[in-house]
Image: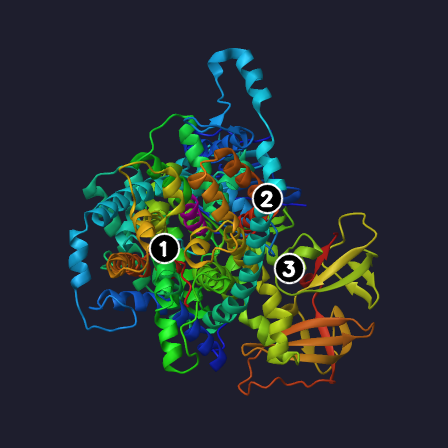
Amino acid sequence: MATDSGAARGRSAGERAPLVRFEAISKRFGAVPAVETLTLDIVRGEFFALLGPSGCGKTTLLRLLAGFETPSEGRILLDGADIVDVPPHRRPVNMMFQSYALFPHLTVEGNIAFGLRQDKLGRDEIAARVGEMLELVRLQGFGARRVHQLSGGQRQRVALARSLIKRPRVLLLDEPLAALDKKLRAETQFELMELQRRLGTTFVIVTHDQEEAMLVADRIAVMNQGRLMQVAAPSEIYERPNSRWVAEFIGEATIIEGRPAAAGRIDTALGPLSIADGVQSSAKTVWLALRPEKIVIGMQRPKDAANALAGTIFEIGYRGEMSTYKVRLADKSLMKVAVANVGARGRPPYAEGDAVWLSWPPDAGIILTS
Amino acid sequence: MRRGPTSFNIVAVAIGLAFLYLPIVILVVYSFNASRLVTVWGGWSLAWYRELLHDEAILGAAWISLRVAALSATAATVLGTLAAVALTRMGRFRGRLLFSGMVYAPLVMPEVITGLSLLLLFVALDLDRGFWTVAVAHTTLTTCFVTVIVQSRLLDFDRTLEEAAMDLGCPPVKTFLTITLPLIVPAIAAGWMLAFSLSLDDLVIASFTTGPGATTLPIRIYSEVRLGVKPEINAICTIMIALVAAGTIASSLMAKRGASRRERAALGVQV
Amino acid sequence: MQRDRTKRSWGARIVILVPYLWLAVFFLAPFVIVLKISLSQSALAQPPYLPVFDLAAGWQGVTAFATQLSLDSFRLLGSDAIYLLSYLKSLQVAAISTALLFALGYPIAYGMARAPKAWQPALVMAVVLPFWTSFLIRIYAWINILQRDGLLNDVLMRMHVIDAPAAWLSSDTAIYIGVVYSYLPFMVLPLYASLEKMDESLLEAAADLGCPAWKAFWLITFPLSLPGAAAGALLSFIPIVGEFVIPDLLGGSESQMIGQTLWIEFFSNRDWPVASAIAVALLGLLLVPILFYERLQQRSLEGGSA
């Protein structure tokens, strides 16, 4: 069930008309469906992410847009025009490949200028634009170098420059940061966001890294097995997932099953729990999803807490900036709690086996009906 | 298989290489032997090379062989490359099974069969046998070798380079010519070299398909050899070995400085 | 809306058609002609066979042609023992040679695969180089060595292994030496390619699970190298059956291989129909291995490496 909660939220600027529309797109490889009757809009000027586990169809969708695959059914509209029959070399869409795919027999300049030479631009104009690009990606003076003389990060920037120089209407990025180490990846993520903001080009990135998607994207499409699960801004997806699957795929969550009782209350195996509003639907069963960082952990039972449960610490995970606890509750289930390590000592104040109390306010949980 | 060779491995390879090269080395050394006899070492001498220069028959045959080889190698390279492209890039087409069967069969077919069949074809078409029939025969024989080499390279080729080029606006045919072809040139060159040396070397098919005035070098050598060992033959053989060795080493050096290492580098893989 | 991109540009058609036509005309069609000649009768004419297919004679020409076809040549093959013996000898030589090639080639290929990565291209070139120098030359080189007053006898006599020069040449032994020598690269290279592709972590896993090195070889390395071995065996066996040059130059006169028989029938006896019949029968004999080889190639073309 795909919910698109407004295309103009987040940081995207510009018009609201969709630049790209996938209309009832299906793609099958032989008997295997990769994408199933999917409809999706991408807005002009936004940084859009396709996120999902491997095999979910996100790369297929990207390649459909680039033109390297043809859909089994459906239309792909770019600025209102169906581009399915347009071959890749004629689409105003450019792609940055995961492996960079730099031409080994051309110099850096030759690689970057390649697209412009196909359009038969004048030599002076090409030189000027290449110079512009080299400056933009901070590779001035590298024009004459050969590809094998560059480091991984430098090659990535050449690939980026090459794909942007033609000022495409959409830039596709296929897991562009996968080959970089953590530090470099973090830096490059910010650079990409800055670049996108500056150029105003619509970026579509495919990634399996959730944190990356949440950081860079204005909107994320979470996919699973060829279908859209949820399309929304990162905060929306994190704070208001539309299903248990999304709640568990993005970040961590403890899911508690319950039955809606009176307004503001659900009955669960752990007793009655307070929730913010009454449950809208008439569903018999609902699920409460709790994010670990929203739960408060303490030795004493908190006074006046809307929801409080007793438990024993089952497992502690120390992650430097925070500690995660798995707490065993009365019904033998485990609840995940995350606490920032604000104390100077660093060692978590609890030990395995300690008896603790967990509490959270009524509006901390998310009610899910699927 | 990178755990390092055992002494058995090293000995095996060493003996194998010695076995392969010993006869050649002996041949070359004895081409400089002043004495006619193999068992007697008469000292270093270029006598046989001098005699070679006067032997019109052999020199003429060598010239014909070189021309046939150059011509058929070039034709075979063109045909073989086209066949390799057809087999790796054209997907399924009608008659593909038959096509690939025809392409690979000459690799294993005994030469007497191929030679006989080609001669009978020429006879049926009432063609005069000679230079051109040998060239056509050699082209047919060597095309498959070129195909195998080029096809193997095309299969290994990184398709994302082609996709990147098309993504940047380069139409498919132009992509093949400006991106793929330059990067597979070492394989094509290797194919040409192989076709060249196979043609230069062929005895059976040339015997069947040649005619008066187009005696190739192997045919000449063969008829002399039946009469016994002659140091002049050693001399011409040494020259041919030197020629082929130089060409092979040159083309493999070209390949070393060539695409495949660059390609791997371009993939951003730190090896 | 279903998409279908089966329209091929004219350029693509040419890429397929040019080699296709060439091979159809110069490779396939000749076989048909060989078949036809094998069904013809020998004659003292130019060309030396009857009947000649004369299209100008119309339908009558065709029927006349058909009635004159005969299986005489094939009957001759069946009746005269010399032909059967030649076929058997060829199969025997090919089988034993292939076995020898495998026994000698495997250690070499294995040693090459175990060599340090930096050495491997040089080793491959070292194995390939003799192959690219003339085949005839290398056989000729063996004559130098094996002849009565040749090097081998010289060395053996000096080492007092033998007293008088032995006849190495003109014997089956010489044929085997020549064949193994010439076809070694054909066996070594496919084997090496197969062995080199093998993932070394498989052997590490075996060791980790308690398997000693020699056992790991038999249980893991050897089975995985079999495709390369099969290719090498077929690339050797099939052409060796039809070999001519090696038995002719190095072999004796007591028995012939089928390639020699064909040659003699064609060049000495000028009996084209019989020579063609020999070729047809030889092709029939080799059809199964050849198809096997084609299958191997198809699979490697589609499947790629494991």
- Residue furthest out toward the front: C164
Q: Which residue is mark 2?
A: C287
- Is residue C259 positioned above or below C113 on the image? above
Q: Which mark is residue A249?
A: 3
Between C144 and A291, which is closer to the camera in this rendering?
A: C144
The residue shown at (41%, 83%) is C160
Same chain letter for marks 3 and 2: no
- Is residue C206 positioned above or below C48 on the image? below
Label 2: which secondary element: helix
Q: Residues within 10 Å of mark 2 (few under 14, many from 20)?
A: some
Q: Is residue C192 covered in magenta?
A: no
C227 on left or right of B173: right
Q: Residues within 10 Å of mark 1 (few under 14, many from 20)?
A: many
* Residue span colored magenta: B143-152
Look at the image and tell me in which quarter the C terminus of chain B lies.
Answer: bottom left
User: What chain does mark 2 sit on?
Assistant: C
- Residue furthest out toward the bottom: A345
Q: CA distance from mark 1 to mark 3?
A: 70 Å
Q: Which mark is residue C136?
A: 1
Can you tell which of label 1 and label 3 is closer to the viewer?
Answer: 1
Give residue C46's quadrant in the image.
Answer: top left
What x and y, as percent, mark residue C93?
A: 55, 58
Between C104 and B146, which is closer to the camera in this rendering?
A: C104
Residue type of the residue flagged with mark 1: Leu
Q: Are marks 1 and 2 in contact (CB under 8 Å)?
A: no
Between B215 and B21, which is closer to the camera in this rendering?
A: B215
